[in-house]
Amino acid sequence: MQFANPSTPLAAGYVDEGGYILAFVNVQEGADATFAKDKDVQIYWAGAKYAFTERFEMTAAYYGYKQNSYATGANAGCSTTKAGNCSGTENLYSLMADLRLSKRFDVYAGAMYSEVSGGLASGFLNTSTVDPTIGVRFKF
């Protein structure tokens, strides 16, 4: 995904598609533009699901985010946690098991591990977490 200032800024009062009137527009041309440098975020993921038996299956997945440094001035090119516009990464790993006890009833357990670094960790109290879950489900 690329975040950038629009090439054709819109003024307040612009009538958009569907007749919507844009009352507040905060992107301006010039030095006070929202993005002095384009923000690029790469998003990728992979997953697999395997049925060991007719009643038991597991799912594993990975999700990743990578952000460039779109900071300017003193923070230009930064890769630390001092600002959210520094480059950074986020990685998430998950694993889930599901056991069907009957046609309508199953139990499941799973966990996700996540970690952030650089600008994507700016403001975080914890840069890594483990989030477990366990439950039962009845299907109507």
Image (spheres, rainbow, N blue to C red):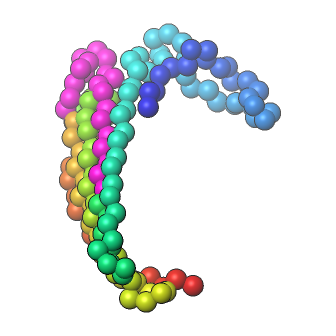
Picture quadrant of residue 69: top left
On-image quarter of the C terminus = bottom right
* Residue for point 47% across, 22% down: 4
Is residue 63 in view from this perspective? yes
- Name the spot of residue 34 as percent of width and height, x first: 47, 22
Q: In the displayed image of the protein, which residue is found farthest to the right?
A: 19
* Residue for point 31% across, 22% down: 71
From the viewer's side, name the closer residue of 79 and 138. 138
* Residue for point 44% across, 31% down: 1
- Name the spot of residue 17 as percent of width and height, x first: 75, 31
Q: In the displayed image of the protein, which residue is found farthest to the front?
A: 53
Residue 70 is inside the magenta segment: yes
- In the drawing, does residue 43 fall left or right of residue 23? left
Picture quadrant of residue 75: top left
- In the drawing, does residue 117 fall left or right of residue 34? left
**90 is higher (above) or lower (below) than 85:** below
* Residue for point 45% across, 11% down: 31
**116 is higher (above) or lower (below) than 85:** below
Is residue 123 in view from this perspective? no
Point out the stretch of residues depicted in magenta: 61-80
Residue 67 is inside the magenta segment: yes
From the viewer's side, name the closer residue of 5 and 50. 50
- Name the spot of residue 125 as percent of width and height, x first: 23, 51
From the viewer's side, name the closer residue of 132 and 72. 132
- Name the spot of residue 110 as percent of width and height, x first: 29, 70
**139 is higher (above) or lower (below) than 82:** below
